[in-house]
Image: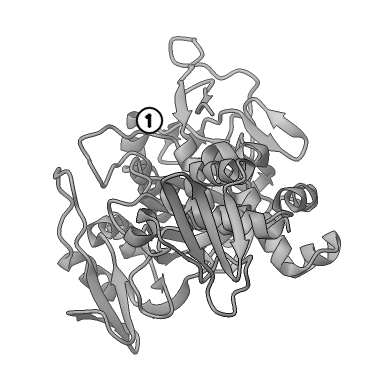
Amino acid sequence: MSDYDYAYRGFSRLQGDAGRLTMLLETSGGATPEGPVTHPQLFTGFLTAPVAAATAFLVVADVAATRYYRPQLAASLDPVVTANGDRLRIESFSGCCGVYARLDILDDGLDGEVIRHGTTNVDVNSDFRRALNRVGAATPLHLLVGADEVAVTTLDGRYVEKQVPLPSRWVRGFAEAQVLATGLSLRAEVPPADAEAVLRAAPRPTTRSVIGTTHWVSATGRGLRPATRPGPGTIGLPGVERLTTLWPVLPYADAVRIYAPADGTLGPVAWEARLPGMRLTLMLSPAAARGFSGEGGVLDDLATSTATEDAALVSALLAWDPTIDVDQLARMADLPSHRVRAALTTLGTAGQVGYDLAEQSHFHRDLPYRPQQVEGLNPRLRAARKLVAAGAVTIADGLATVGKGKEIHTVRFGAGAGAGAGAGASCTCLWWAKYQGGRGPCKHVLAARITTNSM
């Protein structure tokens, strides 16, 4: 599947004077409840905390323009903006896909005249970045997401066609990040000064080809204390250098929340800066050299026999709500909750669903991909289906033999997991030996699960 190109009618810019500044975000093609729109206008109104909002927006844009792993390679992509009726969500991934950033501008952060529903990309250019750095606290900041004029031109009167690919890695990253986020728990809430102390102790990002220092901290009361090794109550910070991107917003935060695996193991971690009327979340992949796009957390749900059909039904029921109530969806779709969650995972692989840690709920966005394209984005799933189609899976006595010829592997299902369960399974292949299920199931486990689901 090819990447999706998007184009703009003009450059995003900051215009006006000290009496009132207007922050115009130029939009590309986007989805709305009325259907696709070439250049949607999603919001017009004021930001109630202009300096904090401008700084947080720059953090999201900086993530999109940065490669934390192999930084010599270029990275310059434009954030995704979703309007959910009562809030704006601005999201991006780093060029290496190992850092996910999202700014949620909530109702208290917006003094809006118009806020619609829809998803689009917004132009971020170097002149616009420099202008945002000059926003002052006393200056009212008016925000336009999408021009309110039919024709917007550059200074020389010509339209801008900025062709920037929206990579399929971002779509896979959106899917994997929301699945991994559902497994994180709130481990600490600390004052910004404590968060700043951790960042001050972190190594500075460099131009080296590899970063990846892992720090451990433990939460004590309302503070953080450095830990020398993992243990009960510790929180792992993989590739801690990547967190320093949050530094600019800490002066405007009243608290920082840290989400990590509840069992204290090393995995993805998310830091959420609570700002006036806003939340800025930075989520790190489990290792600096691992992008979210390759984690494989979605594959178990995708391998179920009903996921695609259920996703089509659930998709028709999504209504651009700022939060998705799984139980309510289950009642509307007349499906059990576990099938709705699997359907949301399937929709997430097409960029249609995200996950908000602060509210512990999914939300709706709409990128230019559809669930029918999912298999092309997941080579392990595609390989598993080929094994099944070739008749290369045999199930007997709680074991699966997968493969033909010299490449045959045994899949063993975990005790109590059931023959069709991906969780608790193991395999004799090299992939499983290397990752032990830490990056999702291998193709052999997936093939075994697909086979048992069809029996």
Quadrant, the C terminus: bottom right
- Please state the horizontal and vertical placement of residue 400, each as a whole percent of the image: 55, 61
Say which of 323 and 301 sits in front. Answer: 301
**Tag count in the figure?**
1
Q: Residue 323's image quarter? A: bottom right
Mark 1: few, some, or many residues within 10 Å (few <14, many ≥20)? Answer: some
- Please state the horizontal and vertical placement of residue 207, each as a whole percent of the image: 15, 43
- Residue 11, placed above or below residue 427: above
Q: How is the image coloured?
A: one colour
- Residue 323 in view of the camera: no
- Residue 241, placed above or below residue 225: above
Say which of 99 and 168 sits in front. Answer: 168
Q: Residue furthest bottom?
A: 221
- Residue 406 in view of the camera: yes
Residue at the (25%, 62%) spot, across then down? 240
**SS of the residue at dot 1?**
loop
Say which of 143 and 77 sits in front. Answer: 77
Residue at the (64%, 39%) spot, across then down? 42
| Amino acid of disc 1 | Asn
Residue at the (31%, 64%) spot, across then down? 251
Q: Residue 439's image quarter? A: bottom left
- Please state the horizontal and vertical placement of residue 15, each as a whole percent of the image: 44, 32
Left or right of 9, for residue 127: left
Residue matched to label 1: 125
